[in-house]
């Protein structure tokens, strides 16, 4: 009989020093469609179990050299084999040994001469129990994993809520303060003052919008809702356009330079990348370089490649990151101790790292305080 609790046939190991018993049991079990293995001694049985773990063992109680009790004891002391149900085969006059058999961990026994229906019923019952136990264990592991995941998500959400409410407060205070001031006194304010206050309100509102965008991006990545859309791109043209746009927007007070460090015309492989993810990554690295370095200093975007990766380097001559803090830079909400007075939430690098992971790449940082920082992004060429 093919076991109905498992989509494969169960394997039963029969251990008995009497080949006559083995052949009787073998015939009964084979008729039912079980896979069989045989051993004529305890030692042989242990060697067989090592190579091909059976689903159940029928074990003769009294055998020369190593008896069934010893075999069972050895099996039950090994975590790899302790779940295999062992049914002892006993002659009726050996029944006094059964207490010891159960103490060593036996699941059941059958007495010789074998009653076919009784034998089969016990085998079937213990196989069923074994598979039910396995199913329960799988279910238990799944539940434990699901609970751990839920816990992680809920902790993550709590942290997001607490940081976001803290970070939203200062731009909201600016917006509220200036709006109330304008509402109350706008007739007496000069055009210049009104313009100044409105600009501050706009900047603060933009900060909040950026934070909301970052938080939404994070929750999308976490929920696996970010799809990679790789497409062929001309990387030098892309970077030239990108740098020119950056110079006109966030980096107009800095000197931004594109350095093509290796001739891309010699690259035989096509460059296939998700443009949006690349743009997001470079934009964030350059906005960090701008934020954390003085006006009029140099920021370099270097592009290159090796056999496996396309390589982007963003270097600045800014404040750098203290050595002992560098390992935390990609942690969620992490901000270095020397950056606390500069606006930011510590989300940017974490999002970048997740994006790069999604694409099978990696990111590294080298930094020296008051000298500068270089972030290097590696994206697989044949992704
Ligand atoms: N180029 C850099 N020079 C010096 N420090 C940097 C540089 N880039 C990142 N850091 C440090 O790493 C921290 C984390 O950077 P990240 O981009 O994640 O956050 P942020 O810029 O502070 O805020 P956000 O990007 O979310 O607006 C920064 O707060 C800063 O301490
Ligand atoms: Mg940033």
Image (cartoon, rainbow, N blue to C red):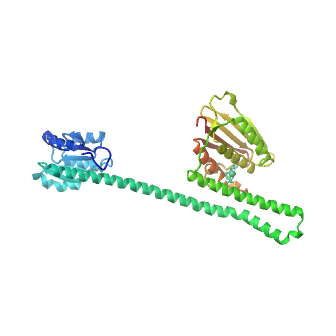
311, above or below 59, in the image: above
Nearer to the camera, 235 or 296: 235
The image quarter containing residue 211 is: bottom right
Query: Would residue 50 be found to the left or right of residue 239 on screen?
Result: left
Nearer to the camera, 308 or 68: 308
The image quarter containing residue 184 is: bottom right
For the question of whether residue 62 can be seen, the reply is yes
For the question of whether residue 324 can be seen, the reply is no
Q: How many marks?
A: 0
For the N terminus, the quadrant is top left
Nearer to the camera, 377 or 146: 146
> Percent position (x, y) of residue 122?
21, 52
Query: Would residue 341 be found to the left or right of residue 364 on screen?
Result: right
Q: Which residue of the protein is positioned furthest toward the bottom in this rendering?
A: 184
Residue at 79% x, 66% y is 178
> Percent position (x, y) of residue 204?
75, 60
The image quarter containing residue 45 is: top left
232, above or below 157, in the image: above
For the C terminus, the quadrant is top right
Residue at 34% x, 52% y is 134
Query: Would residue 325 be found to the left or right of residue 291 on screen?
Result: left
Residue at 59% x, 42% y is 359
């Amino acid at each position: 009989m093919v076991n109905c609790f498992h989509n494969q046939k169960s394997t039963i190991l029969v251990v008995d020093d009497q080949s006559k018993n083995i052949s009787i049991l073998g015939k009964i079990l084979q008729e039912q469609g079980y896979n069989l293995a045989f051993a004529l001694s305890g030692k042989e049985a242990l060697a067989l179990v090592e190579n091909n773990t059976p689903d159940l063992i029928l074990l003769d109680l009294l055998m020369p050299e190593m008896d069934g009790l010893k075999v069972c004891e050895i099996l039950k002391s090994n975590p790899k084999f302790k779940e295999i149900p062992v049914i002892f085969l006993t002659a009726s006059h050996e029944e006094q040994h059964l207490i010891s058999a159960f103490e060593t961990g036996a699941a059941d026994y059958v007495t010789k001469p074998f009653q076919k229906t009784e034998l089969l019923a016990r085998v079937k019952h213990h196989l069923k129990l074994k598979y039910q136990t396995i199913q329960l264990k799988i279910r238990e592991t799944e539940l434990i994993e699901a609970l751990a995941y839920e816990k992680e998500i809920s902790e993550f959400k709590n942290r997001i809520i607490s940081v976001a409410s803290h970070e939203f407060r200062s731009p909201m205070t600016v917006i509220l303060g200036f709006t109330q001031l304008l509402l109350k006194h706008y007739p007496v304010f000069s055009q210049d003052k009104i313009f100044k206050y409105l600009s501050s309100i706009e900047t603060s509102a933009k900060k909040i919008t950026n934070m909301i965008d970052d938080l939404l991006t994070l929750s999308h990545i976490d929920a696996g809702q970010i799809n990679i859309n790789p497409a062929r791109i001309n990387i030098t043209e892309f970077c030239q356009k990108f740098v020119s746009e950056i110079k006109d927007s966030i980096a107009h007070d800095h000197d931004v330079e594109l350095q093509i460090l290796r001739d891309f015309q010699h690259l035989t492989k096509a460059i296939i990348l998700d443009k949006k993810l690349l743009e997001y990554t470079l934009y964030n690295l350059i906005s960090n370089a701008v934020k954390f370095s003085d006006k009029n200093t140099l920021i370099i975007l270097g592009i290159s490649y090796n056999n496996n990766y396309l390589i982007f380097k963003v270097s600045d001559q800014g404040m750098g990151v203290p050595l002992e803090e560098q390992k935390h830079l990609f942690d969620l909400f992490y901000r270095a101790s020397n950056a606390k007075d500069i606006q930011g939430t510590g989300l940017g690098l974490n999002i970048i790292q997740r994006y790069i992971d999604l694409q099978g790449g990696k990111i590294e940082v080298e930094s020296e305080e008051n000298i500068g920082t270089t972030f290097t992004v590696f994206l697989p060429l044949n992704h």
